[in-house]
Amino acid sequence: MDSVLLEYIEQAFDVFQDGIWISDADSTCLFVNKKYEELSGFTRKWMMGRKATSIVAEGIFDVAVNPEVISTGRPVSKIQTLSNGRHLSLDGFPIFNREGKVIMCITFIRDISTIVNMENRLAQQRELLNTLVRINNSAGLQAGEDGSDFIFSSAMEAFLSKARIMAQTDISILILGETGVGKDVMAQRIHAMSRRADKPFIKVDCGSISLNLIESELFGYIGGAFSGASRGGRIGLIEAAAGGTVFFDEIGELPLPLQTRLLRFLQDGVIVRVGTNTPKKVDVRVVAATNKDLEKAVSRGEFRSDLYYRLKIAVLNIPPLRKRKDDILPLAKFFFRYFSRRYNRPLTMTDEVEPLLLSYEWPGNVRELKSMMQEAVVTCPESEVRPHHLPIKAGIPVREETASAGEFDFEGKDYHDLMREMECRMLRAAIARFSGNMTAASRMLRMDRSTMFRKIRELEKHGLKVI
């Protein structure tokens, strides 16, 4: 009976629906069945006589259970990934001789590629969901959330036509314009007019993300990539926008090392998460915006010239509101109606307000106009908003009138002390205007956010409290 079994043992093993690998105490392959040939893509003849450790070293598969089973004398289970991308479940068992010494290892192998791929897809969906929830929770009032859009005069129709043509392509777009002109609204409009409209639109505020976190925020990271990293890793904002549009607001604030990585992504469409060297293809349309003069930033070495010329192919330069006089009243009336409904204050705006709005220069552009209409609706003590209810007169902002000499205490102070006081008051007023939003205040002043914090620290050293 034993001789018959030995004669047909190989055929018996070939009947198994699991792969079988048998090795000796030196991890050298003695036998594999047909099923394992199918799973691995290698013939029995090629594998016989090879050590499992050598095959791992060649990169054909990443792990083996044989050495551990032999050394410990206990069953070992692992997940193995082959060079062809297939995932296998390994269950290795020791075979003992009469003296109790391990002389062989028999390993049963099952294909679990479908399960692993499903788990990976579920993990990616969880990461994407967590990222989108994080974006939604951290975002303030975004452009367009009030239902507003660009309100165009006839003079702006040519501008919109150009934007519409650009939107139909997948080329990267650079939007230029002063603070508050509506660059983020235009970016969303481009997305809405594109073939990607039903896919995600993700905004990246390059000026507000911590320098220590911006790389992992943009490109994501794997578990344990750095101290404090989530165990499961995290998808990056670029990957979260897959199939859609990623909008880099204030791209001029992006650190130079990240500019290099962004350029590589624009060229190859590939990202690499922090903590790994594995590239991943991501299909994303890039729209960038800035109020900086990027040509000057390039000449100062603050912005990569190759990234600038890569973005400069398709440029939209939004005119400031003072050069779009025909847009001022329609925008003012729109925002006035919106905030009247929002705060349940059925107010009206008298005709005398119109020439005042038209004569003002609007240094803060559409954002300033929107804030002024909101303030007028909230603070007006009457049923009608009149010129004296607005913080401007004859085209000059009331809050920004030149200070008189009587407002300063000159006693015991030199020029530098007085200038520090004035700078402190200016920063305090700018920050208060945006309810403590440092990023918005720095943009209005056309000052880097990091520069603003540095100035605040310097003033505090001289006993002046800004915030």
Image (tube, rainbow, N blue to C red):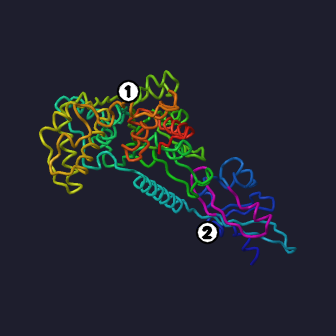
Q: Are marks 1 and 2 in contact (CB under 8 Å)?
A: no
Q: Farthest residue in the top direction?
A: 299
Under mark 2, the amino acid is Phe
Quick one: 279 or 448, which is closer to the camera?
448
Which residue was labeled with disc 1?
313
Residue 157 in sight = no
For image coordinates 49% across by 21% down, the residue present is 299
Q: Which residues are magenta?
A: 63-89
Where in the figure is residue 80, as x and y percent of width and height?
A: 63, 58
The answer to whether 274 appears left or right of 72 in the picture is left
Vertical order, 343 against 278 (above or below): below
Q: Farthest residue in the right direction?
A: 99
Where in the figure is residue 132, as x and y percent of width and height?
A: 42, 54
* Magenta stretch encompasses residue 303: no
Which residue was labeled with disc 2?
16
* Magenta stretch encompasses residue 70: yes
Under mark 1, the amino acid is Ile
For image coordinates 29% across by 50% down, the residue present is 145
